[in-house]
Image (spheres, grey):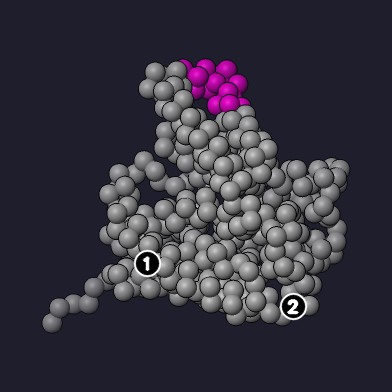
Amino acid sequence: MGFPGLALICVAALLGPLLALPRRWHVPVVVGELLAGIVLGRAGLALVDPAEPTFTFLADMGFALVMFVAGTQVPVRDRHIRSALGSGALRLLAVAAAAAAAGIGLAALFGGGHAVLYAVLLASSSAALVLPIVGSLRLTGPGVLAMTAQVAIADTLAIVALPLALNPATAGRAALGSLAVLACSGAVYFILRGADSSRARRRIHRLSEERKFALELRIQLAILFALAGLAVWSHVSIMLAGFAFGLAVSAVGEPRRLAHQLFAITEGFLGPLFFLWLGASLNLHELAAHPAMIVLGLALGAAAIAVHALMRLFGLPLPLGVLSASQLGVPIAAATIGLHENLLAPGEPAALILGALVTIAAATAASGGFAATAAAPAPPRG
């Protein structure tokens, strides 16, 4: 891949912001980036080759950064979220039980051996999607707090469980590799917390800001890529390395300047490149050749919405239950790992993405309706 190819990718990735521009649509930027990749890749004009080594490596870097940023967006330090973790965990147990039953049913119906994978997908939520929607619509209240806690737990557990669910045959090895990555991430957390309490981190921050060294960004990237290297060596997805490190940084507290730097490098270049690579890797012709996969994608999306809507029985407003069903990171990670390791059937990666898009559409409509209802003036008392 040369500079003309990179220029084409950067221009095509602008489709993401263009589709997300109308605020009333609440369309995530990644949807347009995925569509751009589909148009340029195997399913479309074939102008980019997702198997090209440089493209693939840059996409892996973007994947690690996207998952890192998703981890930093989990509100670990928010005391209100921590106070709601108990009720959120109980709701998640109910969601997991319903998701397990639905996953087994879908696997039996479509003749696949991925019941555990489907269950993880159905029970998962996307903090990276839900939290920006909650913030942009200024949703508040006990129900929103409980839903946010549930989403944070579900997102974290699904990320850890996904590699084990994708390939149960290597679950033992994957578990050991996951433990190694999590242990190193935990060690990084204690190191960062120690540096923060000793004010060494503040001195580095001031020096970096005064001298324009970007030291914090360099250190964070070095740690992230070291953890990603450990994940690859131990046969674990770099998804876990990025997300675990993001949680560690979130627990310590991320300086605003560093957050802006990471936003620039992730959202400005490597993140869009990754999503465009993923879209280019999806072969939608396989969906046409295997219509059952289209039905599977729609069924996964509908089942995820139904499973999370059951939280209405536990006191959570129905729109918030539907909002908590929104998925992106976990299905994308499943499709990415499945494509890399040939673990999924033809058309199945695209089916997973289709299911995620169904949940995003439903969550967008539900959140908008909930915000409009909350903002409506109360009827006068007679």
Alpha carbon separation for disc pair 1 and 2: 33 Å
Res. 94 image quadrant: bottom left
Res. 61 image quadrant: top right
Tell me the quarter of the image containing the C terminus: bottom left
Label of residue 94 in the image:
1
Res. 53 image quadrant: top right
Q: Is residue 344 above or below residue 64?
A: below
With 3 as the anchor, is 332 left or right in this view?
Answer: left
| Numbered range of the magenta stretch | 203-219
Which structural element holds mark 1?
helix
The front one of 26 and 47 is: 47
Q: Is residue 368 above or below residue 66?
A: below
Q: Position of residue 270 (x, y in %)?
A: 68, 44
**Amino acid type, residue under disc 2 in the picture:** His
Looking at this view, name the residue that lies furthest to the bottom.
Answer: 382
With 120 as the anchor, is 267 left or right in this view?
Answer: right
From the image, give the main secondary structure of the stretch colored magenta.
helix
The front one of 372 and 89 is: 89
Residue 214 drawn in magenta: yes
With 267 as the anchor, is 347 left or right in this view?
Answer: right
Q: Can residue 367 be seen from the camera position used here?
A: no
Q: Earlier in the sequence, mark 1 or mark 2?
A: 1
User: Which residue is found at the position 29% from the left and 58% from the top?
Assistant: 87
Label of residue 374 in the image:
none
Tell me the quarter of the image containing the N terminus: top right
User: Which residue is found at the position 23% from the left and 73% from the top?
Assistant: 378
Circle 1 packing at 10 Å, graded few (<14), some (14-19), many (20+), is some
**Amino acid type, residue under disc 1 in the picture:** Ala
> In the rendered image, which residue does mark 2 sit on?
290
Q: Position of residue 13 (x, y in %)?
A: 71, 54
Q: Position of residue 319 (x, y in %)?
A: 39, 71
